[in-house]
Amino acid sequence: MYVKILYIELMNFNLKHPLCFLLILFSAQLQAQAQKKYVMVIHGGAGTILKKNMTPEKEAAYVAVLKQALQVGYDQIHSGKSSLDAVEASIHVMEDSPLFNAGKGAVFTHDGRNEMDAAIMDGSNMAAGAVAGVTVIRNPISAARAVMEKSEHVMMVGPGAEAFARQAHLEIVDPKYFYTRERWDGLQQAIKEDSLKAVLDHGSKKSMKLGTITKDYKFGTVGAVALDQAGNLAAGTSTGGMTNKKYGRVGDAPIIGAGTYANNATAGISCTGWGEFYIRNVVAHDISAMMEYKKVSLAVAAKAVLEKVGKMGGDGGLIALDRRGNVTMPFNTEGMYRGTVTADGKIEVLIYK
Ligand code: ASP
């Protein structure tokens, strides 16, 4: 914005002065650079996402929803709304799509329920909100935001979180709303593998057993990080967790510092992958801490932390955006649904390596 004012001021000045001409050139260049900085980055999960397993129709469907999510978020930022508004609006699009493991399309627990987790964080004041194990809130990311803005707490779980969401006038739906045939079949497959442990517990990438959880072949969690015109960062993550999860298992997504984190001084981060590893490595906060204490760049910090997770056996990825508009999207799986939009509105969507 300052660059734009400088540019306009110079245009009104004495254009014949040679120094003035140079300054105009310089400010125009700065403006062009500002247009290219990233204002939003999203993900729709990482995992075994291979081109050979994808039909052109399915790929087009994923790309369309990711583009829509970016456009909706960009429109918020472009119209002067906050990064929190952009993150929430963008995640709504992905929660409402059955393609992703969040909101409609969430994976099933061992008991055949959809228990969802979500978190949001405001980098300008480090306020945060999260919900876990919720079953009737149409858009869990909005419940997380309500916890942040309308309560004194950071995290609410299960029926308590749902009662709070009702009070906050959020949309409540019948649990059947979250059902999709694909996720139901995924659960049946996972249960089958669980009971055939001796045969299938061979540690292959395709049917790795995690104690009581059989890992889905891909993770479809969704997340978004945005940088608004005021220079504020926000990050959010929403998920159904992992197929066949038991005992009220909660993943990394709603845990502030593990799967979700934002701090204007460093970056906004949203993770996807094998949650237990992200919790134990406090991944999102670790990246921010490296930037804060060691003054390393976003890309270097994110790469180092993800490598550590990978060495321990955790797979997945993350998206991150810093206050200067730099983006990084590393992952150690075959693919990750991901996309970016720059200040000039240019959208880019990627799926494979
Ligand atoms: N991180 C999520 C969890 O462990 C799963 C995912 O990313 O899809 O709950």
Image (tube, rainbow, N blue to C red):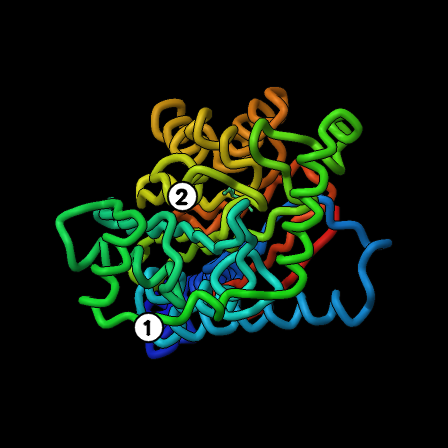
Q: What amino acid is labelled 2 in the image?
A: Thr
x%, y% of residue 308? 56, 22
Measuring 63% from the left and 21% from the top, which residue is drawn there?
A: 311
Residue at screen point 63% across, 24% down: 313
Element class at badge 1: loop
Amino acid type assigned to the residue bearing label 1 in the image: Glu
- Which element carries disc 2, helix, strand or loop? strand
Residue 265 - label: none
Mark 1–mark 2 Cα distance, whole angstroms, equals 23 Å
Number of other residues with Cα within 10 Å of mark 2, as a class: few under 14, some 14 to 19, many 20 or more: many
User: Is 281 in front, or is 29?
Assistant: 281
Residue drawn 65% across and 44% down? 216
The residue shown at (33%, 60%) is 84
Residue sitting at the far left: 152
Residue 93 in view, yes or no:
yes
Q: Which residue in the structure is indicated by mark 1?
A: 171
Marking on residue 260: 2
